[in-house]
Amino acid sequence: GAGVSQTPSNKVTEKGKYVELRCDPISGHTALYWYRQSLGQGPEFLIYFQGTGAADDSGLPNDRFFAVRPEGSVSTLKIQRTERGDSAVYLCASSSPKTGTGGNEQFFGPGTRLTVL
Amino acid sequence: AQSVTQLDSQVPVFEEAPVELRCNYSSSVSVYLFWYVQYPNQGLQLLLKYLSGSTLVKGINGFEAEFNKSQTSFHLRKPSVHISDTAEYFCAGNTGGFKTIFGAGTRLFVKA
């Protein structure tokens, strides 16, 4: 079956511009996560959705970052007024419908490489 | 603060030799522990996980890890590595919620 997909695979933008990164989770997965991975680092948690709602957005670095999941499947990570420090690989993951536990395997997409010039 | 520390950024090893990749965690992330692998140009995939029960966890591709509560460690081991094991390995943990903390990664480089 299809895995987690992310588009675009690469995005180059200029400082100050707005960008949207899309994630298509595995069908039926109600949990969806966004991470940011900077060079030489592990994934850094940004936000977690259970269904349509953001259950934990404590990892979003500031109010320039926002994510939505209006129908409980596809999610979009939105970054306003991009800065050079936002350059990173943005990863999306999804997991099974089980709730109440963080022990579920997360299935990761290939990531979107964002470069802010 | 929650943290997961991978003690080696790079581990070079010869093919067919044993390997251990070290991971220490803070007590606040000790509920569930994971090892993920990222092969070149691929997404992260789960190698193994510890939720409860036996402290020795077996995963895919011959890897295993041991949960050691007194040492707050979750080291990954393989008795004999292959060239194809060359990849980046990430240790991760969470407290039972969904905010998962990842270590910085260990690059395993297997030499012929």
Image: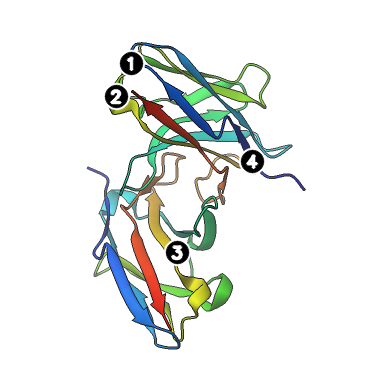
- Disc 4: CA contacts within 10 A as few (<14), some (14-19) or many (>=20): many
Give the numbered dot on residue A84: 2
The reply to whether discs 4 and 3 touch (Cβ–Cβ < 8 Å) is: no
> Which chain does tag 1 point to?
A
| Three-letter code for the amino acid on which mark 3 is drawn | Ala
Viewer-side label of 2, 3: 2
Which chain contains the residue that carries disc 3?
Answer: B
Q: Are marks 4 and 3 on the same chain?
A: no
Image marks 1 and 2: residues in contact by CB distance under 8 Å: yes
Q: Quadrant of the C terminus of chain A?
A: top left
SS label for mark 3: strand
Residue A88 percent location from the top left of the image: 37, 35
Residue at label 4?
A: A4
Give how far apart the Cα atoms at labels 1 and 2 are: 6 Å
State left or right for residue A16 relative to residue A72: left
Q: Are marks 4 and 2 on the same chain?
A: yes
Residue B30 location (% of width, % of height): 35, 55
Q: Is residue A41 visible?
A: yes
Give the residue at x 62% y 26%: A51
- Of labels 1 and 2, earlier in sequence is 1
How far is mark 1 from mark 4, CA to CA? 28 Å
SS of the residue at dot 2? helix
Label 2 Cα crowd, 10 Å radius (few <14 / some 14-19 / many 20+):
some
Per the rendering, the mark at residue A15 is: 1
The answer to whether residue A97 is above or below residue B48 is above
